[in-house]
Amino acid sequence: MPRHTQGTDLLGGHTVCFNDAAAYLQQRNEIFYRGIYHFKPVQAQPRVLDCGGNLGLSAIFFRQQYPSARVTVFEPDPAIADICAHNLAAFGYQDDVELVRKAVWTHDTTLHFDAKGAAAGRVVEGNAATVEVPATALRSYLEREAVVDMVKIDIEGAEHAVLPAIADQLHKVANLFVEYHSFAGQAQNLAGLLQIITQAGFRYYLETEVKIADAPLRDKLEFEGMDAAVMIFCYRV
């Protein structure tokens, strides 16, 4: 299917909806077939914060794998949050997963959001193409917990602001996933994020999320405005 094609799929016997076939297939394969978000819980009732829930597939995965988990999923795009709610209900998780229709940010506020109609919606400077969305401080959720088993942060560039804002709370987190986004023409700060992660006591494993170019030293290509996207898996030993 071409990009931004809407449809449905039968996933584990349940009908789920998507608004971008290509993005959905990538998420489905990574989350359910490969199992990239598997983690070792440290509590009998694991606590999971899913930042950037998109279609709700990761939240569904967390509930399937850890049935006693307390899962909170954040999704600011109004249209995609509706799909997320539908998919959670398709699995019967509408009462088991807390859906927060807000962006995670450094503080409670309102932000301009460029709704891409897919997985690449992001916080941006305001213009005619953006919508205003509410935002909530991620650190306020961390402050309520003694231990958090898993924090997933896939927020399309907002990690550059959010991760430093929660640095002093990361000692509570047992497992952390961060997707780093590098936008063409903007300063790169992977080193800064890795320093925060290292200082919090994590080891990490890096993997490219999207292969943008076969020969990146020769071909300076972009995908969704990005010239690099790196998955950072953070764990403790």
Image (cartoon, grey):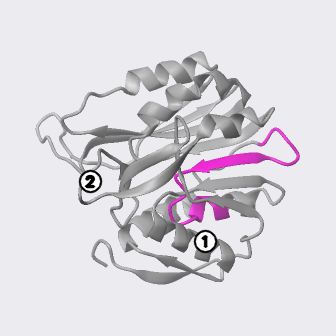
Disc 1 + disc 2, Cβ < 8 Å:
no
Q: Which residue is mark 1?
A: 85
Q: From the viewer's perspective, is the residue at label 1 or at label 2 nearer?
A: 1
Label 2 CA crowd tier, 10 Å (few <14, some 14–19, many 20+): few
Which element type, helix, strand or loop, lies under badge 1? helix
The amino acid beneath tag 2 is Glu
Q: Is residue 121 magenta?
A: no
Q: Which residue is mark 2?
A: 224
Q: Residue at x 46, y 26 (%)?
A: 193
Mark 1 or 2, nearer chain start = 1
Q: Position of residue 213 (x, y in %)?
A: 21, 46
Which element type, helix, strand or loop, lies under badge 2? loop
Q: Residue at x 38, y 72 (%)?
A: 20
- 102 in relation to 18, above or below: above
Q: Is residue 54 left or right of residue 89?
A: left
Q: Position of residue 117 (x, y in %)?
A: 36, 67
Q: Residue at x 58, y 24 (%)?
A: 167
Q: Position of residue 125 (x, y in %)?
A: 29, 44
> Residues in magenta?
41-60
* Residue located farthest toward the left when viewing the structure as drawn: 218
